[in-house]
Image: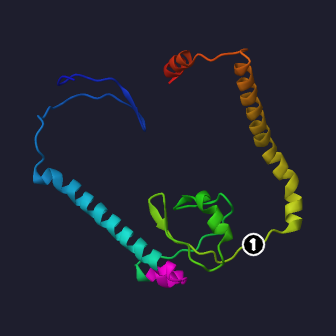
Amino acid sequence: MPKDEFGTAGEVENGFAVPQVIQIEPAHAASFEEARAKVTTDAKADKARELVTENTSKLRQQIEAGKTDLAALAQSVGAEIKTSEKIIRGGSLPEYGSLAERDQEIFTMPLGKAALPATFSGKTLVFAVKSRDSINPEEMKKALPELRVDMLPAKKERYFSAYIDELQKKMETDGLISRDLNLMGQISSRVQ
């Protein structure tokens, strides 16, 4: 875009912006002052990653050696220890996001045993299960009708989708329908 000319308006967080070129600087190697902030930030990020990797490795070794006192483990690597509210299967922790991929481990590991370190949302987590509530048969009985209502639509959709898939395969095999993959590709590229 030439100098002093306006560009196309674009949407930004608080409305729209119209760009205008005010000054053009030719490409050049960055001076030390221009690069200092980026180099400093990159160096700090690299050092932080190294420390996290090193501390995670230390924790892993100590846990594999049978140490289970999380407070002592955290103190040994300068980490902080936090206690969360109880979580449910597929639950999440505010700073780490969903823990669904660790459900099997969380809900079967012995109480008090420390889990091996894992990374969630760029943060390393080591946890131990302090307590576990048993299923109360009376509460389960009360919740069962609501659970059925919640689960039924998903179950119906799964079975209906499987039925439709099988029906399409059978109809294709019997020569009753055919798919033009080239045409489908053209249509989908226009839609995107």
- Residue found 62% across the figure and 80% down from its top: 112
The correct choice, above or below, for 69 with respect to 18 in the image is below
- Nearer to me, 95 or 152: 152
- Identify which residue is drawn at 50% across, 78% down: 64
The front one of 149 and 57 is 57
Q: Which residue is mark 1?
A: 133
Residue 4 image-quadrant placement = top left
Residue 74, percent from left and from top: 46, 79
Q: Is residue 41 magenta?
A: no
Identify the magenta region.
62-75
Residue 100 placement, left or right of 42: right
Badge 1: residue crowd in 10 Å (few <14, some 14–19, many ≥20): few
* Left or right, 184 with reference to 5: right
Q: Along the line of sight, which residue is nearer the eye, 62 or 70?
A: 62
Quarter of the image where the N terminus is located = top left
In the rendered image, residue 61, in percent from the top left (x then y), is placed at: 45, 78
Q: Main secondary structure of the magenta part?
A: helix
User: Was residue 71 drawn as part of the magenta stretch in this picture?
Assistant: yes
* In the image: residue 175, left or right of residue 71: right
